[in-house]
Amino acid sequence: MIASVETTKPNETKPNETAAPIPGSKARALVERDQRVMAPAGRVYPLVVERGLGCEVWDVDGNRYLDMNAGIAVLAAGHSHPRMVQALQDQLTRFTHMAGTDFYNEPMIRAAEKLVSVMPAEQSWQIFFTNSGTEAVEASIKLARYVTGRQNIIGFYSAFHGRSYGSLSLTASKPHQRRGFFPLLPGVQHTFYPNCYRCPINLRYPDCSIACLDMIEKTLFQTTTPPSEVAAIVIEPIQGEGGYIIPPDGALRRLREICDRHGILLICDEVQSGVGRTGKMWAFEHEGVIPDIVASAKGLGGGIPVGAMIARQELAQRWVPGSHGSTYSGNSLACVAVLEVLSLVEETLMRNAAEVGAYLIERLHALQARIPQIGAMRGRGLMVGVEFIKDPATREPAPHLALSVMEEAFRRGLLVLTCGASTVRFCPPLVITKAEVDEGLEIFEAAINACL
């Protein structure tokens, strides 16, 4: 018998009216147990979750938190959405797994049909399901090399694409992510990401005409990397771990033009920015650009581990059976989650991300006006970054302040995460309300003031 979906909240306390100290005794005990059996993973603060609902979570000691990180932009439909719970329960009574690269199953087909339907209609698309974002990136670069017969891949400084060897070779966010793992994938080159707040070549937009991207043709192609041997350029339409950096208008179009001139594939890593988070299904849609391959994950499964490589059909069709595979590709539980998430995003959540995201950005701009240590505030939809600086005149990053604010916010009942050198990111579940934004920003401002 299927259990009924729980929709009541354990209590109505506000985050700063906690039931026990943070972290409490149960949380501390579990952290100690974890450290004895789990490999080091770099946890950012001692949150031990017991349950969640919507944008709220409760820890094992009964403390309530407002969740504005969503498990790193994963919980698109929030915690324990009734439709997600019901869909997964229903599938559990049928079957849980049948390897999708060897056999067929309807949940996989329906999920792929739905995912294709939310892609730009100007192209035909096909799907390869993976278990994560890093696997989606790996599949993307494998396909690019396979169909072009070229070896080189170009990525961007400050990018994050994952931690397995191919994706790690493209990742250029922080040195510790690569330290100790060389040699990496040969043929990977990096260039400057268009970051107008910290222009890598000290120019000013729009007078610069996005000159940093011209360096691909004027520098890379003229020195180390013949364009005829470049399979793909891989870009995050909004850099995630690099600091929630939004490129200027026209940047993706310029990149598309460069790729078209030289027969290079454009791969968009939408692992963190996709599935409605920016107020559109995909962040590349803000510029009207159509990539050749898209890597998706995180929000795609709403908390169930799944990713996808989405490629133009003419490219995907060139893979022969055995060119790529994965035991868990097309897992039935993951695929029913994909179908439900995409349906919810299309129905209401993408619109909510645009509307509540605009409200969040407006409120944060007002906060920036009051606090000079906020050097930049940028975002689209519910993908928003607040960059802390030491001095407005020098714009020197303030990483210690960003970390302190994140930790103080946790102690006060707000869950946020840092990214980049000194940015605090807001990537809440797409179900968040304006009232919850108000509640979260009240805590956030108090945390900042406590750290100054």
Image: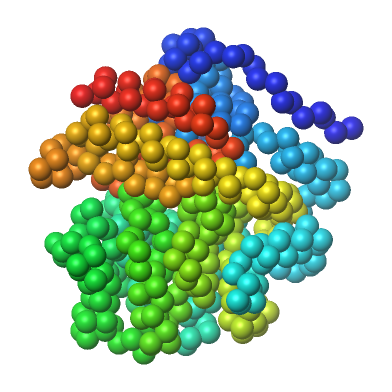
- Expressed as whole percent of the image width and height from the top left, the position of residue 334 reads 69, 51
In this rendered view, identify the residue nearer to me: 33 or 305: 305
- At 23% from the left and 30% from the top, the residue drawn is 371
- Expressed as whole percent of the image width and height from the top left, the position of residue 233 reads 39, 74
Outermost residue on the bottom side: it is: 228
Res. 148 visible in picture: yes
How many labels sit on residues?
A: 0
Location of the C terminus by quadrant is top left
- At 56% from the left and 26% from the top, the residue drawn is 57
Is residue 214 depicted above or below 60 in this figure?
below
In this rendered view, identify the residue nearer to me: 6 or 132: 6
- At 39% from the left and 23% from the top, the residue drawn is 442
Q: Quadrant of residue 113?
A: bottom right
Q: Quadrant of residue 76?
A: top right
Location of the N terminus by quadrant is top right
Outermost residue on the left side: it is: 393
| Residue 239 as seen in the image, left or right of residue 81 | left
- Expressed as whole percent of the image width and height from the top left, the position of residue 25 reads 48, 13
Is residue 77 depicted above or below 242 in this figure?
above
In this rendered view, identify the residue nearer to me: 377 or 321: 377
- Expressed as whole percent of the image width and height from the top left, the position of residue 117 reads 68, 65
How was the colour assigned to the protein in this rendering? Answer: rainbow
- At 27% from the left and 82% from the top, the residue drawn is 217
Q: Quadrant of residue 101?
A: bottom right
